[in-house]
Image (spheres, helix red, strand yellow):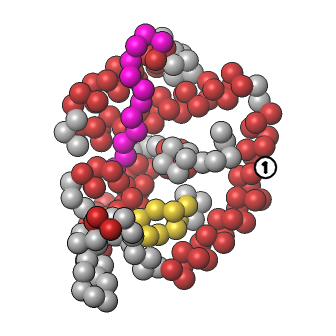
Amino acid sequence: MKKILITSIISLMLATNVSADTDGENSLSKKNSGQVKDCFENINRATFKFNQVLDGVIFEPVAKAYRILPSPVRVGTSNALDNLSTLVTIPNNILQGDFKKAGINTGRFIVNTTVGVVGIFDVAEKIGFPEYEKEDYGQTLGVMGVGEGCYLVLPVLGPSTVRDTVGSFANIMGGDAWYNVTVANDTQHFS
């Protein structure tokens, strides 16, 4: 199983850098153009339609029900999930060589997990810690020079790139599937 996972990740990483346009340029040479190639347009369109149906049938009704909860409950839930997502951010701060942010996020996590009752209350903010700066494995791959690759719409998770898809799987393997659904995609319904 591990061999298959590692082989898949390496293949996807290579695919991000070798996707060539008809003019012979690869994704790295288009870094500054601000556009990501849609290599999987037909699949992306079908997945987008599937996600729209899923959104209307499942996520929107759940979000409407969630909005009925009192504001303090929603804020506490959001705080706890932000606190939990720090477990993805800290290793990525370290992998990116940003030890200062790793230290700040570790401090926030310890304070909010202990004094803030598992992160329900953002005590760290009240005592002067800077705001969370989210990092994920897709961003870390970008810092390491891996190109974005092609645009890809994922079922349930939504729009991504090949690089960020690899990062999403790493986030899930790290135990934070919720991060991919809420934080990374900035889910509109739950705010």
Q: Is residue 40 left or right of residue 99?
A: right
**Residue drawn 76% across and 25% down?**
70
Please check the rendered image and state whether residue 134 is part of the magenta-colored stretch, yes or no.
yes
Q: Examine the rendered structure and indicate whether residue 189 appears above or below residue 130.
A: below
In the rendered image, the vertical position of residue 85 relative to residue 170, given as above or below: above
Q: Is residue 1 visible?
A: no
Residue 94 showing in the rendered view:
yes
Percent of width and height locating residue 134: 40, 39
Horizontal and vertical percent position of residue 71: 72, 25
Residue at 57% from the left image edge and 21% from the top image edge: 120
Instruction: State the residue lying farthest toward the bottom.
Output: 22
For disc 1, the marked residue is: 61
Q: Amino acid at mark 1?
A: Pro
Magenta stretch prevailing secondary structure: loop
Q: Position of residue 60 (x, y in %)?
A: 74, 51
Residue 164 quadrant: bottom left
Please tell me whether residue 92 is drawn above or below residue 128 in the rendered image.
below
Describe the element under mark 1 as helix, strand or loop: helix
Residue 188 is inside the magenta segment: no
Residue 121, quarter of the rendered image: top right
Image quarter hosting the N terminus: bottom left
Q: Residues within 10 Å of mark 1 (few under 14, many from 20)?
A: few
Q: At 64% from the left edge and 48% from the top edge, which residue is drawn?
A: 188
> Front-most of 34 and 161?
34
Image coordinates for residue 84, horizontal then vertical, percent = 47, 32
Q: What is the quadrant of the C terminus in the image?
A: top right
Q: Residue furthest front?
A: 33
Question: Going by the image, does 19 lie left or right of 59?
Answer: left
Look at the image and give the residue range highlighted in magenta. 126-137
